[in-house]
Amino acid sequence: MSTTVTYEAVIGLEVHAQLLTRSKIFCGCSAAFGAPPNSQTCPVCLGMPGALPVLNRRAVEFAIKTALALGCDITPVCRFHRKNYFYPDMPKNYQISQYELPLAWRGSIEVPADGTTRRVRIHRLHLEEDVGKLLHAGTLQAADYSLVDFNRSGVPLMEIVSEPDIRTPEEAAEYLRQLRAILVYLKVCDGNMEEGSLRCDANVSLRRAGSEELGVKAEVKNMNSFKSVQKALAYEIQRQTQVLEKGGKIVQETRLWDADQELTLPMRSKEYAHDYRYFPEPDLVPLAISQKWIDEIRATLPELPQQRRARFAREYGIPDYDVAVLTTSRPLADYYEKVAKSCQEPKLASNWVMVELLGHLNKDGREIADSPIPPAELAALLGLLKGGSISGKIAKTVFEQMYLTGKSAELIVKEQGLIQISDQDALLQIVEEVLAKHPGPVADYRKGKVQSLTFLVGMVMKSSRGKANPQVVGELLLTRLKGEEPGGGG
Ligand code: ADP
Ligand code: MG
Ligand code: ZN
């Protein structure tokens, strides 16, 4: 007899975010991305002996801002440590990081999951320096030499470590999306995972469902998109399940996600904190953060995604799905608000932004900021639709042309004579023609075949080239088919 054990996955994420400061964390070199190799370096970020680090105030401010947004406690006096290691991309062979006294800790992120929200606790948030970038010539196995670019060395990083509160790969991806949205809303990080300004290491273990104890974890690195984090975790859960089901043991190790083969490969056995021989950085004084400074930064916090979601639901009464889509980024949420406010039709605005506008932008790989239709113009189009000047079908054609030409809805409608025909006399003429041309469906309708009416409305719409007001057409047809005098009476 076989017994089947169900396993539960336990996931914790370590996220590194490059801060959008102009200079590096411990020197005045530019932190900008994309400059020629080694053009943004000095003795400090090259790791020359005797060069002294000076802490970048803006980097601390960004970390405090993020900590506040995540509801963390800020450590009044924290300090920096040296994390010793063999770093081929960091000649001083230690990284200045934070260890037992991080800048902040104990926060949380609300993660939407299956129609509810789950609270994922943040364990800690700290500052550290980034290392240089190695470029391996040829394939990794057969490289004759490697090149190193120190432009990235010393770029400020913020590390945000979650508690192991995540349970599924989807939830992990959603946590990352929420965290990214917060960082981007705060303008402390550009959130670009492909360029590496947001990096994620995922820790995952399995345990028997219902157990409280944590299993042995593997740490997966090298994922550069939400999708790859999700896929890597799904793969890792499957791999660990198979090991356990065969009676094997999980070894604590670091694994690499191979995006081409879609699997994780062992990279190195796990190193432990004591291996790093952490000790306090003697070249930096402890960092004291005053309550006054914290309060000043708190006063500059913008409305955060979670607050904005709540307000969108309350103020515009749109469904949760719409709220979630429209608040994925600050520019998109701003765009939607402008349209909704100016046309006074929140649900109509949401449909058109999500379906038509985002549909077109996604297809062209464009961002909302590059939308050829400004919010006021989209609102004007929706105004024409709402007021009955144009039909829904025509509105889509007009949208199409606005998107392509940048012209206003009004101009397009005027130039092409697209104003909806609601005038009864004008429409009646077309209705009569259609009735005369299609005696079959007319007879069918009178015999009780209700669908024939839809057909006849369609014919009128067609012969008016989409300009007829479908509602008025329906009413006119009904009146005629029931044998009453059109326009007469009532
Ligand atoms: P390490 O010392 O190996 O880096 P930490 O305790 O610092 O481990 O935790 C690193 C990350 O791993 C955190 O996000 C934490 O939530 C997560 N984590 C810790 N233990 C486990 C576990 N058994 N299973 C899954 N995730 C874990
Ligand atoms: Mg760790
Ligand atoms: Zn420098």
Image (cartoon, helix red, strand yellow):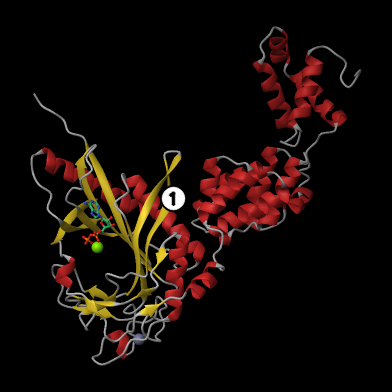
What residue did someone put label 1 on? Answer: 110
Q: Is residue 108 left or right of residue 167?
A: right
Q: Is residue 59 visible?
A: yes
Residue at position x 44%, y 59% in the image: 70
Q: Residues within 10 Å of mark 1 (few under 14, many from 20)?
A: some
State the residue in front, 452 or 223. Answer: 223
Label 1 secondary element: strand
Quadrant position of the N terminus in the picture: top left
Residue at position x 57%, y 61% in the image: 370
Report the image quarter containing ligand 1. bottom left
State the residue in front, 184 or 449. Answer: 184
Q: Residue furthest right?
A: 489
Q: Where is residue 408 drawn, in percent x and y?
A: 72, 55
* Residue 347 picture quarter: top right
* Amino acid marked by disc 1: Glu
State the residue in front, 425 or 217. Answer: 217
